[in-house]
Amino acid sequence: MNMSLNHRARGIFGVRNEGNPQEIFAELKKTVEAFKAAHEEELKGIKSRFADVVTTEKVDRINNEISSLQKALDDVNAMMAAAKLGGAGDGGVTAEEREHFTAFNKWFRKGVENGLSDLEVKAALTTQSDPDGGYLVPKETERTIDRVLSVASAMRQIATVMPIGTDAYNKYVSVGGAAAGWVGEEEARTETATPTLRELVFTVMEMYANPATTQKMLDDGIVDIGAWLADEVQITFAEMEGAAFVSGNGVKRPRGILSYDTVANASYAWGKLGYIASGNAGGFASSNPADALVDTYYGLKAGMRGNASWLMSDATMGTVRKLKDGQGNYLWQAPSQAAEVATILGKPVYTDDNMPAIAANAFPIAFGDFRRGYLIVDRTGIRVLRDPFTNKPKVHFYTTKRVGGGVANFEAIKLLKIATS
């Protein structure tokens, strides 16, 4: 594996990423073919009742290389897509936004407000002039932070992300229940049941970072303040919200997909997430292990499968990559083009290491239409409060972002549970 190439491509938390997706894709294709050949050799040894330790180690090593290359390719593609979304250079930046950026930079360095709150309104960052809670960062800095978040958190790539201007978003869902019947021409029509509406409330929670620097650094005009702020807070924000979207309990943070009540899919009920058992208390079944993934696939209603995708950790994908269907075909398939992601049973698969490992009673795999199934709400704007007093001679920048999240459609997501039933 080309380690220098992989190192360039894995610049996950930097705004710039110099990895060439075509080169990574070519390397991935070669590595996948090597993996298949080594795995077939390993399987022949197992069937012949002897296990070649060297071959097994080779398979695992190549498998790990595939994971690294696939992650690198996904990161580069996501970064390029986000950059196109956010724009580049000065295109689309208004005179008011440039004026606000200049004033914000001066306030950031010197603490001079200079009408900054009024400039926020002129730059359309807010409709109110209220400096008590700090100042909104310029759009370019905010886009830098959001761009990194979209790469670090797989949920931001596959779920619906909705900017809101209030503290909560209310969504009503019809869960059916309307009744009907057949009648004769002259028979009485009795009242039927009324369909049921459920209200879902998505409340934004606040996460913060409190980086500090010295006034000397701020006085150094060559330091890019916007980039510095993004570098300081992006990892903290990305890790916090990424973990919450998967396992957050909803208390002072978003509610993750794995924090809801679960039920065997055969007994599914609204308000819970249905699961399919792996067939083994500690992993996949020893006989026909791929059946659990096939059952999970078909456990989702046909109307939800069109835009469905898989979510699991890198380690779990390494295990799934070895599984075959009844015809001897690998369930996991490498992407056919550099701009695509890998697939399982024809559906894209995303990795998020916030998903648990394969272990008894764990839910290491989720499958569903996450755009319909999970909603992320962003309260518009990232706010900064400058604090030069608390910890002299350092200047703190209390940076906050308000975000919420939760399941929006319980039918749209299914889980795979490591269990016999």
Image: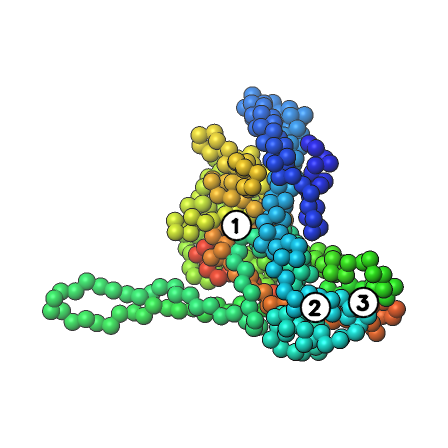
Marks 3/1 in contact by CB < 8 Å: the verdict is no
Q: State the residue at coordinates (79%, 74%).
A: 112
> Quick check: marks 3 and 2 in contact, CB under 8 Å?
no
Q: SS for tag 3?
A: helix
What is the CA distance from the residue labelled 3 to the residue labelled 1? 46 Å
Residue under numbered circle 3: 109
Residue 57 appears in view: yes
In the image, farthest residue toward the front: 95
Pick whichever of labels 1 and 2 is earlier in the sequence: 2
Question: What label does residue 122 carry, if any?
Answer: none
Quadrant of the image containing the N terminus: top right
How packed mark 1 is, by other alpha carbons closer than 10 Å (few <14, some 14-19, many 20 or more), is: many
Foreground of the two, 156 or 221:
221
**Secondary structure of the residue carrying numbered label 1:** strand
Q: In which quarter of the image is residue 189?
A: bottom left
Q: How crowded is mark 2: few (under 14 residues within 10 Å), some or many (20 or more)?
A: some
Task: Give the percent coordinates (x, y) of residue 40.
Answer: 56, 25
Name above or below for residue 84 compared with residue 38: below
Q: Which residue is drawn at the image coordinates 87% and 70% (left, top)?
A: 392
Q: Which of 240 and 141 is in front in this view?
A: 141
To which residue does mark 1 refer?
A: 366
Reading the image, the residue beneath label 2 is 99
Secondary structure category for the residue under label 2: helix
Query: What kind of residue is marked 2?
Result: Glu
Q: Where is residue 85 in the image (x, y as percent from the top left)?
A: 58, 54
Q: Which amino acid does label 1 sit on?
A: Ala
Quarter of the image for residue 192 reads: bottom left
Residue at the location (67% across, 30% down)? 57
